[in-house]
Amino acid sequence: MTARLCVRRMPTVSPLRPAVFFDRDGVVNVSPGDGYVLRWEDFHFAPGIIEALALCRERGYATILVTSQQGVGKGLMTQEALDDLHGRMQGELVPHDAALDGIYACTHLAGTCTCRKPSAEMIFRARDEHGIDLSRSWLVGDHDRDIQMAINAGVPRTVRILSHHEPKVNADFTLAETTELTALLREKLPQV
């Protein structure tokens, strides 16, 4: 009698990859100050950000936008207008190999949801939907709420772009402006 060997193939599991999470206003685009970017005509990429996004992708990182856009909740713009703005932004990034892998926006008014920064909910959704290893990820933001969101999510590396807000939460790296981001990432962001 011959023994039969049963070989069972295990499903292929893709390894988790790290991400660099980006805030939008003040990081990806020039900050509107205390107002909101409500139209594509008012959206201007921050100096150097396209190169930084392309470098992150080149190094093997997912690039994820995590942004608060309560202008929708206030009725200053519609969800469709926000989606259109983000679609146009992506269209401008594609030719540079800098398109974002995911866009997550909290559009609710303060105090009416669980996803508003510094909650880690947007990061956790991105983790689950994109297979992200948070333990090797980074976040680039310009407010305490951005840095605190990263800390709450267990994202170990944070970069603050200085803004008109006085920092109270420490980031790992602090830059005067977005033009310095590519050089920092080129030096510190490991290849995946």
Image (cartoon, helix red, strand yellow):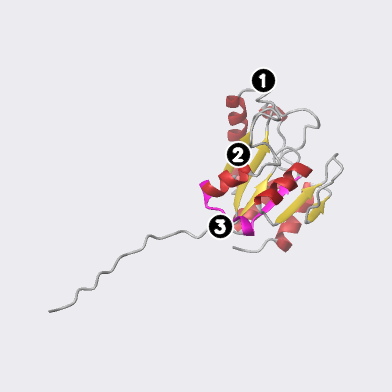
**Which disc, if any, is residue 104?**
2
Residue 93 image offset from top left, x and y in percent = 61, 43
Graded by Cα atoms within 10 Å as few (under 14), some (14 to 19) or many (20 or more), the crowding at tag 2 reads: some
Which quarter of the figure is the C terminus placed in? bottom right
Q: Earlier in the sequence, mark 2 or mark 1?
A: 1
Q: Earlier in the sequence, mark 3 or mark 1?
A: 3
* Tag 1 residue: 75
Give yes or no for residue 133 being in the magenta stretch. yes
Secondary structure under badge 1?
A: loop
Location of residue 12 with respect to 148 vertically, above or below = below
**Kind of residue indicated by mark 1:** Gly
**Kind of residue indicated by mark 3:** Arg
Give yes or no for residue 179 being in the magenta stretch. no
Graded by Cα atoms within 10 Å as few (under 14), some (14 to 19) or many (20 or more), the crowding at tag 3 reads: some
Q: Is residue 113 left or right of residue 4?
A: right
Which quarter of the figure is the N terminus placed in? bottom left
Secondary structure under badge 3?
A: loop
Q: Quadrant of residue 141?
A: top right
Secondary structure under badge 2?
A: strand
**Which disc, if any, is residue 124?**
none
Magenta highlight range: 129-141
Task: Write the residue at 72% across / 38% down.
Answer: 29
- In this rendered view, identify the residue nearer to me: 172 or 96: 172
Q: Quadrant of residue 30?
A: top right
* Tag 3 residue: 17
- In this rendered view, identify the residue nearer to me: 45 or 17: 17
Q: CA distance from mark 2 to mark 3?
A: 18 Å
Graded by Cα atoms within 10 Å as few (under 14), some (14 to 19) or many (20 or more), the crowding at tag 1 reads: few
- In this rendered view, identify the residue nearer to me: 126 or 188: 126
Farthest-out residue, bottom: 1
